[in-house]
Image (cartoon, rainbow, N blue to C red):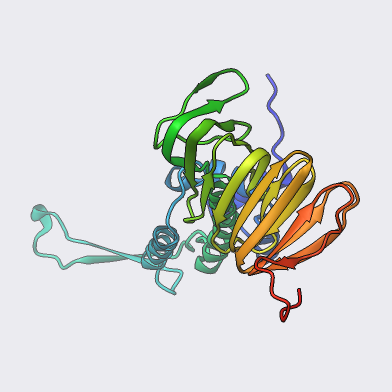
Amino acid sequence: MSATNPSPFEELVSRYLDGGLTDTDAAELVASLAEPALAVRFLEMTRLNSEIAGLLSAPVPDGAMVELVRMDIEKSLAAAPPSTGVRLRIAERTQSSAGAGPTVCSAPRPLPPRRKPVLRALAWAAMFLVFAGAAIFFLNRTRLAEAPAVASVEGEVQLIGPNDEHPVTPGQSWQRSETLKTVGPKSTATVTFGDGSRLELGHNCIALNQSSKEGRRVELHHGTVQAALKKQPARRPFVFSTPEAEVIVVGTTLKLATGGHHTRLDVTEGEVRFRRRHDGAEVAVKAGYFAVVAPNVPLVAKPLHADPHRSP
């Protein structure tokens, strides 16, 4: 019968649980807990595993986690032995020897070493940083990838997925890789995102949701979309793409129309980067201006309302 030899890290944790760590061992263990894989193994080997095992699958509030750390440290402090290494045992004599006084017995055995409160605090801090950081990252990414909802529809509106096609009803999610299609001259749809951003798809519109954890992206294959977008996270703009162009938005109000090998962008608030796809040429279009990407058309921003006294 053979058994797997424990790793150096497992031996450190075992000595930690038995209260036999030296100062050198303690420093090595704390340094090891900065690695996520070793932090996970630490949890598996200690009784504290059951208290935080669900952190990544079901995020725990920071306050609750800090309270667990505080309580555990306080318990360690409360259980700390007196500074002396000698225990005294006072025993009352039995009734048969009631005439005698109490017996005081000294026990000169040194107490076994206890786990150091400072080490426990550092270990908790290392695990907290690893797991809380991962949970925050997971939550932020989840919000960015959250599917928008179809707030309202008028006329015939279809949702086309990789495997099926069905009519859209208000409140339904518009998932990644699904195409939203308004059919006919009287069909429209309104889409809202979790941050309050809003899209209005006009008639005979075909739009594909390509949003991901990296940011929101809508491919407009045909038709018109009007957008009122909230300020987006840094370095994660809202991007519209058409066969001819890309619109990079950090938060503004605009109108985008594509069809017949041309794309037009009108901006009513804020400023938008308008990029021609075939050569990467780009122009900034600010409020009150428009630009067009089309064959043999210069990519320049022009005022929405012609005014001989106003220059682009």
Question: What residue sits 48% from the left and 35% below the top?
Answer: 186
Does the rendering let one see residue 14? Answer: no
Question: What residue sits 50% from the left and 59% below the top?
Answer: 112
Q: Residue furthest bottom?
A: 309
Q: Position of residue 90 (x, y in %)?
A: 25, 64
Q: Position of residue 300 (x, y in %)?
A: 81, 64
In this image, 105 relative to 15: left or right? left
179 w.r.t. 165: above or below: below
In this image, 183 relative to 32: left or right? left
In this image, 281 relative to 152: left or right? right
* Residue 179, picture quadrant: top right
Question: What residue sits 73% from the left and 77% below the top?
Answer: 308
177 w.r.t. 57: above or below: above
Say which of 139 and 93 sits in front.
139
Does the rendering let one see residue 139? Answer: yes
294 w.r.t. 6: above or below: below
* Residue 107, picture quadrant: bottom left
173 w.r.t. 38: above or below: above
Say which of 268 and 151 sits in front.
268
